[in-house]
Amino acid sequence: MEGSGDEFMKYRSPLVSRYASKEMAYNFSDRKKFTTWRKLWLYLAKAEKDLGLPITEAQVNEMESHLDDIDFVVAAEEERKLRHDVMAHVHTFAKCCPTAAPIIHLGATSCYVGDNTDLIMLRDGFDILLPKLARVIDRLADFAEKNADLPTLGFTHFQPAQLTTVGKRACLWLQDLVMDMRNLQRARDDLRFRGVKGTTGTQASFLQLFQEDHDKVEELDRKITEMAGFKKSYLVTGQTYTRKVDIDSLSVLASLGATVHKICTDIRLLANLKEIEEPFEKEQIGSSAMPYKRNPMRAERCCSLARHLMALVSDPLHTLSVQWLERTLDDSANRRISLPESFLTADIILSTLQNITEGLVVYPKVIERHIRHELPFMATENIIMAMVKAGGNRQDCHEKIRVLSQQAAAVVKQEGGDNDLLARVQADPYFTPILGQLDALLDPKTFIGRAPQQVARFLSEEVKPVLEPYKSKMDVKIELEL
C-alpha cells in the first residue's frame, strides 16, 4: 500500500520529522557523528605521526580517503556482537582501511571520539542558532522602529496602565533577546575541546606511547585541538569533560526558551485584544468549528516547544550531580536525548519566531479605540493641573473629577457602555475655563513620555552592535511548514 513504508511503523521524533531545520537535524545525525569520529581518528594519527610515532603516510592517506563511506549495516552488526559502539566503528573503519587498522584509535579511549564529537556538535549547533536569533532581532527591530511613536495602552497586572508605544513594547522583547544573543555567544566561545586525555584524564597511555616525553603529549593535545577548530582544550578532565559544560550550554537555551515564551504569550494576549496578530495565510483555517477564528497558532507552537526547552535543562543538572569520581556511564543515554533535543527545539522556535516577526500585523484603529476607552481616566491629573493654572482650587477640582469619574466608571462596568467622562466634563460649567484645551490634554502622544526616544537610542546602542557580525546572513527568509 502506498505510504505504508517502515518509517510510518515506528515512533519518529516530531522535532525532526515535523519541525527542525535540515541543518540542525543533520548536526545531530548519525552521519555527522560517525564521520566526525573518523575525522578525529585521522587527526590523532596525523598528530602522532608528526610527533614521531611509526605511522606511515600511506596509513594516513588511506584513512583520509574513507572518512565518508561508512557501512552502517556492518557497524550495526559489529555493535550487536561487541556491545560497544566505539569499538564497532573502529572495526568498521578498519575494514575500509586494512593498512591503517593497527593504528586506528591508538592510545585513545572511547571518550576521545564521543566527548570531542559532542563538543563539536554543541559548537556547530550554536553556530546554526546564532544567525537565526540575529534575524529575529533584526525583524523585531524593524517592527519597533516602524511603531516607535504609535501610542498604545500599557498593561500592568494585565490591567490598563499608562500609555506606552507599540515600538517601545517591542523593545522590551528585544532587550531579552539581545541578552540571549550575548549568552549564546558566550556559551559558544567558552566551549573548549576535550582533546586527548586517556581513560581517567591523566594521559598515561600517551605518555607511554611517547616514552615519558611530557612535551610531546602536550603538543599532541594542542595539535588535535587545533585541527578540530578549537582554540583551547580543557586542561583537566576525568574520563569525560565535565558535564557542567552541558549545563552551561542548555541553560542559555532554556533562558532563550523563557524569553520566547514571554514574547509569544504577549502576542497571544494582544491577538485576543485584536491589536496585533501574527501572519495568517489566505487559506489558513483557524478552527474546524468556528470559521471566523484566527488562532495565533505560531505563537502557541513557540510557547509549547519553549516549555519543553525550559524543562530540558534539568537533565544536565542531575547528570552532573551524579558523575561519581572520574565518571559513571549513567550520563550517556540521557545526553543522547537532552543535548540534541535542546538544540533542535531552540532551532524550530527561532525559525517560527522569525516567521512571526516578519509578518506581525498591527491594527491602529483598534488600539486607538482601546486608548479612547481608558484615556479619560488617565487624563484626570492633566485636567486638574490645567484647571489650577486657570485659577481653580486643586481640592475642589479633584472632588469634581472624582465624582464624574465614578459616574463614568459605573456606566462602563455596570451598564456596559462607553467611557463618557469627557462628555461629563464638557457638560459641567465648572470646567468651562479649559474646554478649549481638552483635545490637547487628551492627545495620546502627550502620554507616551520618552518612549520614541528610548526606542531610537536602544536600537542604535544595544541592537545594532549585536547584529553587526551577522549582516551577511540577514536575507534568509523562513518558509514555515504548519
Image (tube, rainbow, N blue to C red):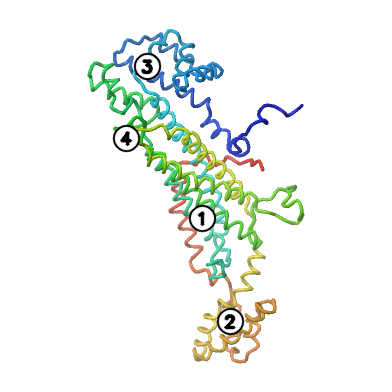
Is 73 left or right of 420, judged from the image as shown?
Answer: left
Instruction: Look at 55% across and 33% down and name the residue there.
Output: 23
Is 395 left or right of 304, judged from the image as shown?
Answer: left
Q: Mark 4 or 2, which is nearer the eye? A: 4
The local crowd at label 1, few if under 14, some if 14 to 19, many if 20 or more residues have their Cα within 10 Å, is many
Are the residues tagged 1 and 2 within 8 Å (C-beta)? no
Q: Which amino acid does label 3 sit on?
A: Ala
Q: Residue 173 carries which label?
A: 1
Q: How far apart are marks 2 and 3 (CA)?
A: 84 Å
Q: Which amino acid does label 2 sit on?
A: Gln
The local crowd at label 2, few if under 14, some if 14 to 19, many if 20 or more residues have their Cα within 10 Å, is few
Tell me the SS state at disc 1: helix
Q: How far apart are marks 1 and 4 (CA)?
A: 43 Å
Are the residues tagged 3 and 1 within 8 Å (C-beta)? no
Q: Distance between the residues labelled 3 and 1?
A: 49 Å
Tell me: residue 439, above or below residue 71.
below
Q: Mark 2 or 3, which is nearer the eye? A: 3
Q: Which residue does the numbered mark 4 point to in the structure image?
A: 325
Tell me: residue 236, above or below residue 446.
above
Residue 365 x/y as whole percent = 67, 65
Q: Which residue does the numbered mark 3 point to in the structure image?
A: 45
Question: Going from the N terminus, do you reach mark 2 or mark 3 first?
Answer: 3
Question: Going from the N terminus, do you reach mark 1 or mark 2 first?
Answer: 1
Q: Mark 3 or 4, which is nearer the eye? A: 4
Residue 426, located in which quarter of the rendered image?
bottom right
Tell me the SS state at disc 2: helix
Question: Going from the N terminus, do you reach mark 4 or mark 2 first?
Answer: 4
Residue 298 x/y as whole percent = 63, 49
**Residue 94 visible from this viewpoint:** yes
Q: Which amino acid does label 1 sit on?
A: Trp
- Quadrant in the picture for the C terminus: top right
